[in-house]
Image (cartoon, helix red, strand yellow):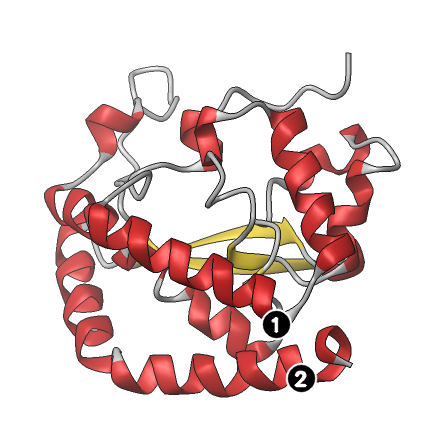
Amino acid sequence: MYSTFIKRFIDFFAALFGLILLSPIFIIVTGLLFLSNNGKPFFFQKRPGKNERIFSIIKFKSMNDKRDEHGNLLSFEHRITKVGAFIRKYSLDEIPQLINVFKGDMSLIGPRPLLVDYLPLYNNEQKLRHKVRPGITGWAQVNGRNKISWEKKFELDVFYVNNISFFLDLKILFSTIKRVIKKEDVNSSENLNMPFFTGNN
C-alpha cells in the first residue's frame, strides 16, 4: 500500500510544496547561472528510472562547457564556476530534481539514478534497484555514498527496494537533512567522484 500509492502521493505534494517554498531561491540561482553559464542554467542528462524507463534528470548546471584544443571537456576543477561551487556546497544544485519528482520520474527517496551506460553491466540482483522510482537521496547516500564500493552501494540500493517503508524513508530523510546541514558528502557526485562502473569482474 505504502510503496504503490501513499509514497507517490507524498512525493507529489512534497515536491509541489518544495517548489513553491523554494521558488525565490530557484529564480535567483537560475538567474545567476544564466549569466555565468552563457545562458544555460540547467543540466539535463538521460537516466534510467523505474523499470529502466529512460527520463531526463534536471539539475542546476554547476560547470561550464570549456574544452581543450582537442575538443575534450576540461577537468572538473577547470569547469566548476564560482556560482556552481556555491550551489554544490549547499546542495542547491539538486533543487530542480523536484520537477522530476512532481512529474513522477523520480521519488524524494530511492536509489540514485545512474548512467544509462551502466544498464547492461548490472547482474540480476543489482537490476532490482530499478523496481522502484529513483530518488534524490537514498539508503546508499546516507551510508557512505562515494566512500563505499559500487558493489556495496548496489547492495544498499537492493536492501532499500526489499525493505521500503514509511519509517525507513523518514530515517533516510532526516539523515540527509543532517548531512546537508553538516555539509557531509554534499559536494560529491556518483559520476565525478566514483570510478566508472565496469561491471562485476
Residue 174 quadrant: bottom left
Task: State the residue in front, 102 or 90.
Answer: 90
Quadrant occupied by the C terminus: top right
User: x%, y% of residue 77?
Assistant: 22, 25
Q: Decide: is 196 above or below 124.
A: above
Q: Residues within 10 Å of mark 2 (few under 14, many from 20)?
A: few
Secondary structure beneath label 2: helix
Q: Residue furthest top?
A: 201
Q: Quadrant of residue 94?
A: bottom left
Residue indicated by mark 1 = 166
Q: Is residue 40 visible?
A: no
The numbered mark, 1 or 2, whose residue comes first in the sequence reads 2
Helix, strand or loop at label 1? It is helix
Q: What residue is rendered at 68% in x and 52% in y? A: 160
Residue where numbered disc 2 is placed: 6
- Type of amino acid under label 2: Ile
